[in-house]
Amino acid sequence: MKKFISPFHLIFTLLLFCNTANLYAQTKTEKKNKESGEITEYERANAEYLLIDAQKFYLLEDYERAIAFLEQSIDVDAKNHAAYFKLGEIYLIERKYDKGLKAIKKAQEIKSNNKFYYLLAAQIYKSQNNLEGAASEYELMIKNTNDYREYILDIADVYVGLANYDGAIKMLELTEQKYNTPNKFTTQKKELLLQAGREKEALEMLKKLIEDFPNKESYKLEYADLLASTGKKTEAADILKSTNTSSASNFVLINLKLEQGDFESAKPMISEIIKDKEADLSAKLLLMSNLSATESYKVSLSFLDEQQKTLYSIYPNQLEVIKTGEKVYTALAEKASPQEKQGYEKQVLTALNRLKDLNPSDYEVWNQLLTRAYNQESWETLLTNSEDALSYFPNQGLFYYYYGNAQLYSSKGDKEEANTAFDQALKLARNDDSLTSKIRTRKLAFALEEGNTKEIQANAKASATSGKMDKQAIQLFLRYLNANSEQKFIEEILVVVEGLIKENSLDGDLFHVKAKVLFQLGRFADAKQLIENFIKQNPAHVTGGLLEVYGDNLFMLNQIDAAVAQWKKAKETGNTTDKIDQKIANKKYY
């Protein structure tokens, strides 16, 4: 009897057979993919998902978690070159250069035509100061990839760092080729050839260029410049004369003539270029600055004056022209004869005042104006200018210093106001030691004039630093003692000086002042003993001024020959009074 098979059972059997066949085929495919390194679409998607998570943590600078996700992504997809690249980036940031190189080299193995993988490897090498390694990565990039032209100049820089000038020149030429800009880097190639000591090749390259492009003026200028720098000035001049006489070639030719000392030949060209409204202004100003710095016997001062006035007429309110004018006239005033000097100095003041009016917030211009008035003891001008300056710079100690001096010495001055200004200047000078010293010295001078012993002591003490008295303060004391003989006040100064000496026992200048005080008080024997003790104990700190006063006291004690001997020593040591030669010649105190 036959067994009955239902239709349902038949269908189930068929389905089971198909599923088994499919499962067998899938297992066979997965085994084959695993052996070949291929992964499923599901695995690829999972690897990409892990890479995205890694990128999130990278942006949050959580590099540890980013690395963990990248490693998981690579476990899923061993050919995930993007994950290796990102690992390389993180290891570069963390300065784990060996790990970074290992990761990026793996990315290069998987995908060799990605330029960014070579750029990252080069960056890692450069971070280790390994230019050879960087160069090798750049060379691999050129060999294996396309569209790298924007990085060729970086490669040239690396070659220059390796002193591989041939390689650098090759890269410049490759850039010209890739961008279709022939001879764009002529100047750079010339410099590289010169650095390589191949001057002849540089000259030949430029010579060929002017032969191939006879109307290209820039090549002629380059060639002339190189000829001049290599001592071939006549040939350079001939090349420049063959140009279209543009302002650029004229500037080079003028400088060439000046280098040759041929100022007369350069004068017409200078005049022409200064008058040329189309010529580059910055080049004109540089030319004027260079001319004014030239030795006076090589140029005509009146000619320079004429050229500067021409510039003023063409550019009446141009700041840079006026600034250059101030420098030019300052230089002319230094070189001029006494008869011409005053006129040039007047032009300097005119320029400074114009600059002040055009830009009243220019600190340096005010500083120059005030310094000039101060040095010339032009107190009325100083008072006016310093009051104006204070309105623009109310917190500048320097301006209060000038304002105090102006108040002290001008006809409209107020001594109390002056002292207040000096106090304000001291507050604002802060860490400016030079300015503080100036203010202290001026306050000391004021105190000496007023006979204010308390102020003298305070400012003299503040002027003594690092075991030495301020030189200006010393000179003030000496000038005052030479001009005054009021015994009571000089005795008060003696007390001040003795207090300073206790704190500055090696300062020969202070002993000089004390000896001068004793001399003024007629205590010649005491002064003599003081100086002899100091010379014996501190021979290395003896000054010419101290020896001169020693001689003065010996003279008053009628020890004439001994006095002359000390005066001679003082002259040899230096820093004596202008009477020293008379004292020695006439054997007499003056």
Image (cartoon, rainbow, N blue to C red):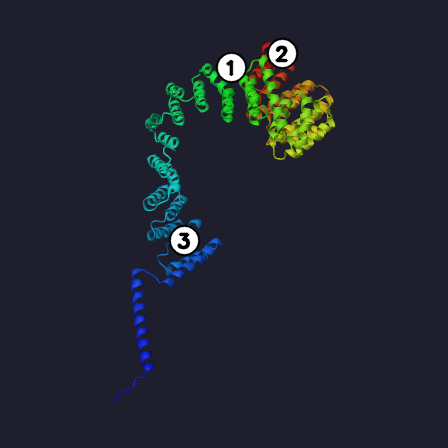
Q: Is residue 584 left or right of residue 485?
A: left
Label 1: which secondary element: loop
Q: Is residue 32 left or right of residue 478?
A: left
Disc 1 and disc 3 in contact, CB within 8 angstroms: no
Real-space Cα distance between discs 1 and 3?
A: 70 Å
Q: Quadrant of residue 210?
A: top left
Marked residue nearer the N-terminal end (2 or 3): 3
Residue 525's x, y, as percent?
65, 19
When the figure is inspected, residue 383 is found, relative to residue 17, above or below; the finding is above
Please tell me how crowded label 2 is: few (under 14), some (14-19), or many (20+) other residues with Cα within 10 Å: some
Residue 282's x, y, as percent?
51, 26
Q: Which residue is mark 3?
A: 87
When the figure is inspected, residue 479 is found, relative to residue 163, above or below; the finding is above
Q: Amino acid at mark 2?
A: Lys
When the figure is inspected, residue 557 is found, relative to residue 31, above or below; the finding is above
Please tell me how crowded label 3 is: few (under 14), some (14-19), or many (20+) other residues with Cα within 10 Å: many
Label 2: which secondary element: loop
Label 3: which secondary element: helix
Q: Is residue 293 visible?
A: no
Q: Which residue is mark 2?
A: 588
Q: Amino acid at mark 1?
A: Ser
Please tell me how crowded label 1 is: few (under 14), some (14-19), or many (20+) other residues with Cα within 10 Å: some
Q: Which mark is residue 24?
A: none
Q: Is residue 244 visible?
A: yes
Disc 2 and disc 3 in contact, CB within 8 angstroms: no
**536 or 227: nearer the viewer:** 227
Q: Mark 2 vs mark 3: give the one in front.
A: 3
Q: Which residue is mark 1?
A: 300
